[in-house]
Image: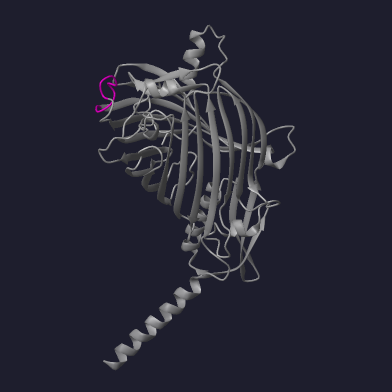
C-alpha cells in the first residue's frame, strides 16, 4: 500500500515538473515603430507582462487578444506581435505602424440626417439649393502628446453653426485606470425642427435671426481596470433657447411656457468590449449598459432611462460570418418635452427607414446580417507616397444580407405618426468596403414594410 502511494506521489511530482518546464517565461517586451506613441500606452493594452510564466497556447491566446486591443486603440494602421528566442530567453516583439494624428481640415458638409435625405431635397431644387451646407474648420488631434489623448476644436458656420471643444485623457493616475473627458459645444440654427408629423421633421426657419440655440456641457470620468471593461460616470447639462414661433407651434417643445429650457442628467455606463475590430466586427461580442437620471432645470425633464446594447459576431465557416445586435431604450410612461426625447432616425435607425424619423419615449431595435468575405484583408503600398503613415494601406470587401426589426413606443404624439407603436421591419443586401483609418463605405439596397425600395449610402458600422 505504502509502495503504491509512493509511486503515485513520484508520478504526480514528476508531472508537475514536466508541466512547469513547458511554460515560457517572458524575458523582455520590445516595442518598435512608435515614434510618437509612448511605450506605456502600448504596454497598457497587452494582456501579458514581463516576467509572466505561460504555457505556449495561453501565450498565443494572449498575443491575439493584445493584437485586437491595439487594433481597437485606433492609433495604428498595422500592428504585429511575435516571439523571439535568444540564448534561452523569450522576447516579445511588438511592432506598430503609426497613423497620422493631426487632422486640421476644412469643413464642407451636408446638414441633414443622412445623405439620401439631403440628395432628395437638393434634386427637388433643380440642383441649385446649397443652403443646407456647412463650412468652417475642424481640428482633430489624435494621440495628443503621444498619450492617446484626444483634442477636438470645431468652428463651423452655415446652415447649422457648431462650435466645439473636447479634450479626452484616457489615464492620468499612476496605475493608468482613471481618465476623464471635458466637452463643450454650441449649436446655432436659422432653420430648426420643432415637431414630428407623418414621421417627418417639421421645420421653422427665420432668415434674419437664429431660431434655436443649444449649449451643452459634459464631463466624463472613466475607470478602466483591465483592457476590456470600462466604467464611466457622465455629468451632462443642456440649455436650449428657441424662437417665440417654435413655442407657439409646439408648446410641448420645452413644456414650460417659456422660450428657454434646461435640464441635467447623470449617467452610469458599463462597457464590455470583446469584438475583434470595432469598425467592422467579424468575431466577438459587445455589451453596453447605461443608467441615466434626468433632473429638471427650467424645463421639466426628470425621468429615469435605461439603455442597453448587445452584439454577437461569429464565423459560421470559412469567409462566412453572422452578426447580430439588440438595442433598447426604456423610460417610464411620463410626459417628456419634445427636445429631450429621441427615438429612431438619428444616430439609431432601422435600415430601409432612413427617410423617416420615428419619435418616441422608448424603443427596441434588432439587427442581423450574414456577411460573405469577397476579398479578405489585403495589404498594399500606395505608389509615390513616402510617408509611412499613408504609404501602406489595406482593404477588404464583403457582401451581406440583412434584416432589421424595431418598435418605437410613443404615448404623446400618436395621431399623425403611423410608424410608431407598430412592428418595423426592413431587409436587403449590402456591399461593404473597409479600408485603413477606420474608413467604411456601405452601399445598401433594401425594402421596408411600406413596400418602399431604395439604395442607401452609409459610412459607419451598421450595428
> How would you classify the magenta stretch by its main secondary structure?
loop
Q: Is residue 207 visible?
A: yes
Q: Is residue 12 above or below residue 199?
A: below
Q: Position of residue 238 (x, y in %)?
A: 46, 39
Left or right relative to 415: residue 71: right
Q: Is residue 439 visible?
A: no
Depth check: give the residue in front, 451 or 171.
171
Residue 421 belongs to magenta span: yes
Q: What is the magenta range?
A: 414-422
Depth check: give the residue in front, 345 or 74.
345
Quadrant assignment for the N terminus:
bottom left
Quarter residue 418 falls in: top left
Quadrant assignment for the C terminus:
top left
Q: Position of residue 393 (x, y in %)?
A: 63, 37
Colour scheme in the image? Answer: one colour
Q: What residue sits 61% from the left and 35% below the top?
A: 154
Q: Is residue 198 above or below residue 345?
A: above
Left or right relative to 385: residue 189: left
Quarter residue 89 falls in: bottom right
Amino acid at each position: 500500500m505504502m509502495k503504491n502511494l509512493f509511486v503515485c506521489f513520484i508520478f504526480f511530482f514528476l508531472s508537475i515538473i514536466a508541466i512547469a518546464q513547458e511554460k515560457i517565461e517572458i524575458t523582455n517586451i520590445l516595442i518598435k515603430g512608435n515614434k510618437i506613441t509612448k511605450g506605456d500606452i502600448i504596454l497598457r493594452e497587452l494582456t501579458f507582462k514581463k516576467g509572466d510564466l505561460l504555457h505556449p497556447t495561453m501565450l498565443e491566446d494572449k498575443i491575439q487578444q493584445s493584437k485586437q486591443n491595439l487594433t481597437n486603440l485606433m492609433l495604428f494602421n498595422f500592428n504585429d506581435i511575435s516571439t523571439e528566442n535568444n540564448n534561452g530567453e523569450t522576447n516579445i516583439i511588438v511592432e506598430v505602424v503609426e497613423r497620422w494624428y493631426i487632422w486640421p481640415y476644412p469643413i464642407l458638409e451636408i446638414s441633414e440626417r443622412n445623405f439620401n435625405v439631403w440628395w432628395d431635397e437638393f434634386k427637388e431644387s433643380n440642383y441649385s439649393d446649397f443652403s443646407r451646407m456647412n463650412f468652417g474648420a475642424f481640428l482633430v488631434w489624435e494621440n495628443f502628446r503621444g498619450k492617446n489623448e484626444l483634442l477636438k476644436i470645431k468652428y463651423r458656420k452655415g446652415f447649422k453653426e457648431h462650435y466645439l471643444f473636447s479634450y479626452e485623457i484616457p489615464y492620468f493616475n499612476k496605475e493608468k485606470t482613471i481618465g476623464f473627458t471635458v466637452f463643450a459645444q454650441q449649436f446655432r440654427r436659422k432653420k430648426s425642427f420643432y415637431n414630428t408629423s407623418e414621421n417627418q421633421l417639421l421645420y421653422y426657419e427665420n432668415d434674419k435671426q437664429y431660431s434655436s440655440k443649444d449649449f451643452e456641457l459634459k464631463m466624463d470620468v472613466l475607470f478602466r481596470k483591465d483592457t476590456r471593461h470600462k466604467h464611466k460616470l457622465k455629468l451632462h447639462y443642456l440649455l436650449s433657447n428657441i424662437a417665440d414661433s417654435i413655442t407657439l407651434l409646439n408648446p410641448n417643445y420645452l413644456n414650460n411656457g417659456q422660450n428657454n429650457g434646461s435640464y441635467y442628467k447623470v449617467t452610469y455606463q458599463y462597457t464590455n468590449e470583446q469584438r475583434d475590430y470595432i469598425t467592422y466586427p467579424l468575431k466577438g461580442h459587445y455589451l453596453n449598459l447605461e443608467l441615466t437620471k434626468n433632473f429638471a432645470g427650467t424645463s421639466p425633464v426628470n425621468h429615469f432611462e435605461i439603455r442597453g446594447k448587445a452584439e454577437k459576431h461569429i464565423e459560421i465557416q470559412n469567409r462566412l460570418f453572422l452578426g447580430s445586435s439588440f438595442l433598447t431604450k426604456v423610460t417610464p410612461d411620463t410626459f417628456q418635452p419634445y427636445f429631450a426625447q429621441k427615438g429612431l432616425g438619428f444616430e439609431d435607425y432601422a435600415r430601409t427607414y432612413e427617410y423617416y424619423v420615428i419619435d418616441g419615449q422608448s424603443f427596441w431595435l434588432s439587427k442581423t446580417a450574414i456577411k460573405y468575405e469577397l476579398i479578405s484583408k489585403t495589404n498594399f503600398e500606395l505608389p509615390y507616397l513616402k510617408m509611412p503613415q499613408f504609404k501602406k494601406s489595406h482593404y477588404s470587401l464583403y457582401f451581406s444580407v440583412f434584416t432589421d426589426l424595431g418598435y418605437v413606443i410613443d404615448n404623446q404624439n400618436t395621431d399623425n405618426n403611423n410608424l410608431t407603436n407598430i412592428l418595423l421591419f426592413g431587409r436587403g443586401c449590402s456591399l461593404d468596403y473597409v479600408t485603413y483609418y477606420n474608413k467604411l463605405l456601405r452601399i445598401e439596397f433594401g425594402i421596408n414594410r411600406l413596400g418602399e425600395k431604395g439604395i442607401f449610402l452609409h459610412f459607419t458600422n451598421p450595428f
